[in-house]
Amino acid sequence: MNFDLEREWGRANGIVLALLLHCHVVCAAETPALNAEGFAIPQANRQFAFPRDHGSHPEFAIEWWYVTGHLVTTDQAQFGFQATFFRRALVRPGVPDNSPPPTFGNDQIYLAHMALVDRASGVFRSQERLNRAGWDAGAARNTLDVRNGNWSLRLSPEKSAGAGKEVFELQSTVGADAALMLTLTPKKPLVIFGTNGVSRKAAEASASSHYLTYSRLSASGRLMLDGTSRDVSGEAWMDHEFSSSQLGEGQIGWDWLSLQLFDGRELMAYRMRRTDGSTDPYSTVAWNDGQGVVRQIGPNDFTWTVQQRWHSRVTGADYPSLVQLVAKNPATGKPETFIVQPMVADQELSGKVGGVAYWEGACRVWDENKKEIGRAYMELTGYGESLKEKF
Amino acid sequence: MAASNKAVLGILWSRFAWRHWRISPISSVLLLLILAIGVAAFVSIRLANRAAVASFQNFSDLITSGSDGIIMAPAGALSELVLTELRQLLGPEPVNLVAVVETSAVPPRRDEDETIGSRPVFQLLGLDLPALVNLSGQQTNGRGWLGTATSRGTDGSRKEFTEVLRNPLAVFISEALARRDQLQIDSPLPLVINEHAVELRVAGIIPTDPSQPAVPPHLLIMDLPALQRLTDKTGQLDRIELLLEAGPRRAQQWALIRKKLEAASSSRSGRWLLSTPADRRAAASTMTQAFRLNLDILSLLALLVGLYLVFQGLEGAVVRRRSEIAVLRSLGVTSRQVQGAWLVEAAAIGLAGGLIGLVLGWLGAQFAVRMVARTVNTLYYASSVDSAAFSFGEAIVALIVAITAATVAGWRPARVAANTPPAQIALRTGAATYPGGQWLRRPGLGLTLIVLGGLLASLPPLRLAGGGRLPLAAYAAGLCWIFGAGIFAGNVLAWLGRLFARFRIDSVGLRLAGSHLRAPSGRHRLAVAALVCAVGMTAGMAILVGSFETTMRGWISRTFQADLYISSDGAQSASSTSRISPATWKNVVTNPAVERANVIQVTEINLGGVTTLLMGSQLAFFRDYARPAWLSPPLHEDVFDPERNAGLALVSEAFSERFRVHRGDRMQVPTPIGPRSLTIAGVFADYGNERGSLLIERQLFSDWLGNELASSLILALKPGANAERLRAELRAAYPGLGVFTSSYLRDEALRIFRQTFTVTYALELIGIIVAVAGLVFTMASLLWERRGDLATLRSLGLRRKELAGAAAWEGALTAAAGLLTGLAVSLALGWLLIYRINKQTFGWTLQTDWPVRQLSVLALLVLASATMAAWFVGGWATRLPADREE
């Protein structure tokens, strides 16, 4: 596993980890506006405005837009996909102006990951890309329009106007032989995780984010694979998070889970792992019921049990490959069991470009009676080596 | 039957050929060496050429592992905006677009007297460093440029990535340079880039894929925007390389993308052009094709002369072994078997000579490659190759050439041997005279060849792709004349023999020599023909080079009329891309001591797939201070008036020849703002480059190309101003500028000119050495054949000294005949080289000059060495027993 990061570059790569930090915890009462480097710290009761807040927030050090989902082709072939766009500021923000961005900027760097897994064949394709801000990578400030090379995620004004609601477009490829063009339409309202619009990630007051999610979107479009083009449809999950924080003390990695149940509910689970393997107090599970009402529970109300592991020959890491999540349903007060099993064992991103290897993959979800009850995407980090020394 | 034939051939080889080789090892070795030298000259030039061509490198290939396509501007630099345009055009296509800025740089001069081209030239690439990690080849290195391992210095220290991006002087160097110059992270690397003397800082070692060739020490890499600023190319790129993502369908996808790009290129008024790395390598190869072919052909000179000698050697051997052949024939060996044995022997000589030649050629290539590379670097493109790798392919070619040539040369002697009647054994002494060379006694054949040569000389050149021209017919004409004159030379020898016989000189040696030459033997004729070949070609080249030098001198003295000439101190050759920023040149030209100044701007342009140079100059200044020699003078003064010359251009002779355009013709020129129309107002002689120059008013150039970067400045000073003082003042103010006086530049231009002919001189010398060695060989054979006569003369009372003197006279007269005819041929060859080969290849009209002193030295050298060699051989021959076997 290639994880020999420089401090500075490590901060840039912190994107990878920080973006993966899908935690939300209580915000401190008095939070400074800026951190030591001059970047903004998320503040409670921020007045969000859209589509502006779908766009980039360069006053924050790190930001990401994250889409995962499950697709089926017209001939019933099933695929999982991941599209992630990261932004990391390299210098403290200056006074915003209207001058055109430089062709080769030195103030921001953009990392992106694309992955596609074919459930039937078990083939997992993935690619990473890194570009400086400028002609080949960037994110608009006033709307969702983020791009990296030939990959992009945009809010389509035309389609949005036609549909009467927000419609997003994803353009992605993996290598030379896979291309995915999707139209994404939210089925549920936008969720803002955390308390008063702030999601705490660690004990440190500055370690928090604004965490916005569409937990269920309909997805449709075309998949071109090995020279064949096919229509696809399915459901997706989309996150947008911006912050200026790093990992907290004593944290070595985390497990993240997004579940889309067939009954219309969604769960977002985040378990931060500490050095001794225990669950960090800032871990959480959020329930989104069929009507879009979100309730959160703390680490005392859920358990995360690893039942099987998979060994990566590429990085040498041992990742959980069968997980049982038992979480108390805040609506009923009763625990529910979710058994999460990867569709394909090897869905590891090797980190050749970003320098951080992790596992992120499409999963099936079963209940305790072995009945399939939904789909999921699971993210597992810090299994190759501890991330603590790097951040 | 076949088996018995093989057995007979085997016996013949071991008992007949090999035995003779062992009995007379010196002559055998000499024969092999002569052939080996010929092969060596051929091999060394081929290997050197190969290395020089291979040295053209898309340097970015070392980083990108080879791109699929390259986007370049048809003229000047490419706007950065093209990147966005291409990304939009390509949409979701999985293509990496790698922007490249490239320039050359040199270390600052250590003393003021350093000659141009004496400092090592670095190739500096500007690449978007963060994006490089996306390339698959780079990913195999871990995180490539961003990984700590690769930004680590040899001392283990390392640079943080963002620090590299923020440091405008950060440079990555090769492992080889770090080791050679003991450079570490943060070591300073002082360089002259454009006119800036800057001190770069080593930020790391260039990471490469282990499967790729090692990064050469002269390759340096910087972050692209940093190099843009250093080279005053902000907003501009030199090229964009396209790399498809890896995958099994990459080839099909590239075909589709290529179509899309080509369609877009034509619909965008040709603002950019698509090519491939293979196209670029082919273009570079084509650029030097004529130069390399000329060297190849010249390198065949020694081989050609060597073949005469192999022919002589084998025919001589036939004579010496004639009695043995007759015995073999009487023992039942068929004439076919005898001929086969001789051909095998000839092939064996070819193989052995070829193998020795390969070794010598490879050694010679190590020297030749530097000379070839220097010329390529001076005239064509950056090349810093300093060694020539052995090539299996070239070795096979050389061996085939050697064996074929020796077999062809041995064909006739083999026929003669096969036709030896068995009865010859009874007539041993009478048969000792060499009967061959009948074809050399046919003056009609010589005349036919000379006439044929005349016809061939009038044919046009073969036009090659990329604008090159190959004067194939002219080369064939030269060969016809050399062979034709070689046949006639035998008659010249006879004439000389008769001439000396008329003089009643009381010299036994001279009279003896004259008696042999009045009716020269086939061997004499062959020796003279070989000398004609060597002297004719050598003297012809001397005439060409002499004429070239005279013309250059005249051109240089006319052209460098101004007082000071200024360029970037990094400009070490014609291939340099170093420029002077407008801020600097505007300061220089407004110096109070300057009366008039010419700012020269240059860019490569692509005219219908052929690259040439578009130059901006104040045309009135050009007229007044370069004093061009007009081949077609402008018909009126409009072209020199900036108010009236907007659509007018002057072109060099090479341009006119290359593009077949003349005064009054109109042509379209690509520019970044679209094609522009120009009318040719005049054609001038220019020996500065063979690609041709299209000269327009500088302001027009600046408007079209959108920049004011100057390649050089020419200053005419006010009366009384001191050029040396201003030079010192400018050097102190701008350490990155090279400031030269006209006299210095004239000397340097001539030095560089002579430098480019170093290979030619070396090849000529080899040709002469082989020819003189051949004469020695001939004399030895002749005297061997006459050993009986020599013994008789000795018994009649002639002293050894007198007999050696006779041999010396014979050698001298033979050499004189070869020289006379060879010099006559050289006049024709000189004309052919100047007015046909040179004009057709380079498009340059030269002023004919006869380098009398050089030719006299050549004649004396040949005559003296031939006489001395013959004298020694004569002395040796008098010690031979009358009937020793060999």
Image (cartoon, grey):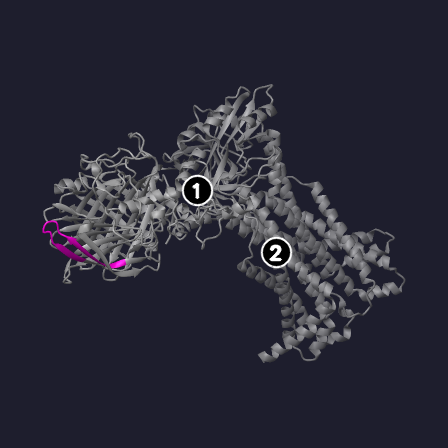
**Which dot, 1 or 2, sits closer to the camera?**
1
Q: Which residue is mark 2?
A: B361
Residue A149 seen in the current view: no
The chain identifier of the residue carrying mark 1 reads: B
In the image, residue B121 lies at what x, y percent?
A: 53, 41
Seen in the image, is B374 located left or right of residue B519? left
Q: Quadrant of the N terminus of chain A?
A: bottom left
In the image, residue A73 lies at what x, y percent?
A: 19, 57
Q: What's the amino acid at mark 1? A: Lys
Seen in the image, is B329 located left or right of residue B655? right
Q: Are marks 1 and 2 in contact (CB under 8 Å)?
A: no
Q: Is residue A315 above or below residue B109?
A: below
Magenta segment boundaries in residue numbering: A320-338
In the picture, residue A153 is in which quadrant?
Answer: top left
The chain identifier of the residue carrying mark 2 reads: B
Query: Which SS does the magenta portion mostly show?
Result: strand
> A164 and A332: which one is in front?
A332
**In this rendering, do the residues under marks 1 and 2 share a single chain?**
yes
